[in-house]
């Protein structure tokens, strides 16, 4: 197997998926790391599937696509869940700790900023900390009134 070709294909698909995810919404992105406690990760995977959220990793486990793929397969099992490796997204949303929950408005478009792309601050709300997706969405709905509607849409989806 040519891992370089797989990685190039994954990168191309990931970039396209990320751009499309920003174009429709509201969307929830959950920034995680494979080094997080297993219980927290499993809970987030379960909840992300229910909320139809996207899990975002900064990079590869130990710099290896093979190790990353194996860890993701073990973590996801048979679940239908979007997961992407996107180090630029960590910069785009200034994510400095995991988990961080980023709620994007419907129709949010990334824009070119310097050498990368960025998202206008009024287009997203975020909260960080070891919490459930439900708690994060409730927190955003209560404390970020301009995102109340989006958070409630995703809460309803989560609770279906």
Image (cartoon, rainbow, N blue to C red):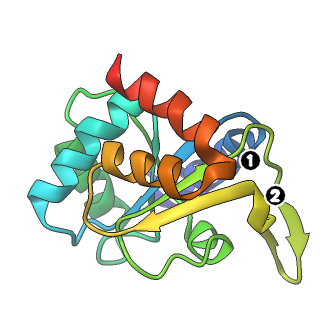
**Mark 2: few, some, or many residues within 10 Å (few <14, many ≥20)?**
some
Q: Residue at x 11, y 59 (%)?
A: 38
Q: Does residue 23 appear left or right of residue 87 in this picture?
A: right
On the question of residue 37 being in view, the answer is yes
In the image, 81: left or right of 78? right
What label does residue 28 carry, if any? none
124 or 14, nearer to the observer: 124
Picture quadrant where residue 16 is located? top right
Seen in the picture, residue 148 relative to 2 is either above or below; the reply is above
Task: Please indicate whether residue 113 sits to the left or right of residue 3 in the image.
Answer: right
Vertical comparison of 154 with 39: above or below? above
Q: Quadrant of residue 97?
A: bottom left
Q: Position of residue 12 (x, y in %)?
A: 67, 50
* Mark 2 secondary-structure assignment: loop
Residue 104 place in picture, x, y as percent: 65, 49
State the residue position of label 2.
Answer: 110
Viewer-nearest residue: 82 or 120: 120
Return the disc, 1 or 2, that comes first in the chain's sequence.
Answer: 1
Q: Position of residue 129 (x, y in %)?
A: 32, 69
Front-lying residue, 35 or 98: 98
Q: Which residue is mark 1?
A: 19
Residue 84 seen: no
Residues at circles 1 and 2 in contact by the CB criterion of under 8 Å: yes
């Amino acid at each position: 197997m040519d891992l370089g070709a797989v990685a190039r294909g994954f990168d191309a698909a990931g970039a396209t998926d990320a751009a499309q995810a920003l174009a429709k919404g509201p969307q929830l992105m959950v920034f995680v790391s494979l080094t997080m406690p297993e219980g927290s990760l499993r809970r987030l995977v379960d909840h992300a599937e229910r909320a139809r959220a996207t899990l975002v990793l900064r990079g590869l486990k130990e710099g290896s696509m093979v190790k990353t793929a194996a860890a993701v397969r073990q973590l996801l099992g048979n679940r239908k869940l979007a997961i992407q490796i996107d180090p630029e997204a960590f910069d785009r949303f200034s994510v400095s700790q995991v988990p961080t929950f980023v709620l994007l408005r419907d129709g949010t478009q990334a824009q070119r900023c310097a050498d990368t792309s960025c998202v206008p601050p009024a287009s997203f709300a975020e909260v960080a900390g070891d919490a459930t997706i439900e708690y994060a969405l409730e927190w955003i709905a209560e404390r970020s009134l301009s995102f109340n509607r989006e958070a409630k849409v995703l809460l309803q989806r989560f609770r279906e």
